[in-house]
Image: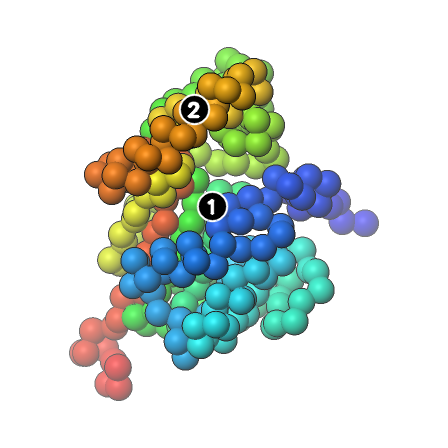
Amino acid sequence: MTPQNPIRAFYETHPRMVSSPFGGIDGIDAELFGAVLDRLGIPLQDQRVLDVGCGRGHAETVVRARGGRYFGADFAISAAGFPLAQADAAYLPFPDAAFDVVLCVDAFEHIPDMEAAAREFHRVLRHGGHFFLSAPNYGNVAGLVKWYCERFGGYAAHSWAPFGRWQPQEFEQALTPGRIRPLFVAEGFTELYAIGHGPDIGLGIFPWMDHPKMPEAIQYRLQRFFQWAGPPLARILPTLSLHLFWRMRKKRPSSSSCESC
């Protein structure tokens, strides 16, 4: 019998740890998701959209409402009313250039072979198509705390995160812009652009906000402060945010190499 994927096993037994700025296992913040896609200029109308690491496929409601056709891929299969493939992100079972848009929403940090996954995202995307990535960002104070906790603070490698009251994760890699940019550029992506998420500024700057010993009264005041200060800070210094939202494109072939582009 093949051993169960430890990442899959963890999230099956800890379903509430499946989280994102856009929601968790219960649904999606369609208004926020749509606003981010609009700000990044990612169209869904009449587009074939692949959601890698789709979970329960909550993004399907947004894609369908915006006139797109939704496909999901995940290493775990659940009941779904949309086309869904059980697949590893590093080995997607789709032909080349099959999709106009590829989404990867808060799943990339859990993929062991990120280079292979980025290569697959590029392969299944048509020329000129858009790739959207939502991922934790540790190019801030939270990243320094993660480094310290995983070396000296009793956390295993790739396990600390400043949410869920610092409950250990199964596989939480320390992604930063300095890691993401060269990785995706090397696989052929271009026009990389990222924006921060205002509500996440607090955890990026002061991750002790969600420490299990943080008094609730202080935590509440800090949350209120960053609700006010977070959005302008995210616009000025997006890397302070605990999450970054990325837009990338698959470069169109040159006219000399493509007769009908």
- Residue 258 vs 28, above or below: the answer is below
Check disc 1: other Cα within 10 Å, few if <14, some if 14-19, many if 20+: many
For mark 2, what is the residue?
221
In the picture as drawn, the residue positioned furthest to the right comes out as 1
The kind of residue on which mark 2 rests is Arg
Q: Is residue 178 left or right of residue 151?
A: left
Q: Is residue 26 left or right of residue 244?
A: right
For mark 1, what is the residue?
21
Q: Is residue 236 left or right of residue 3?
A: left
For marks 2 and 1, the one nearer the N-term is 1
Q: Residue at x 32, y 62 (%)?
A: 38
Residue 149 lies, in percent from the top left, at: 50, 19
Residue closest to the eye, 185 or 82 = 82
Q: Quadrant of the C terminus?
A: bottom left
Specify the label residue 46 is tagged with. Answer: none
Q: Is residue 167 shown to the viewer in this render?
A: yes
Residue closest to the eye, 259 or 129 = 129
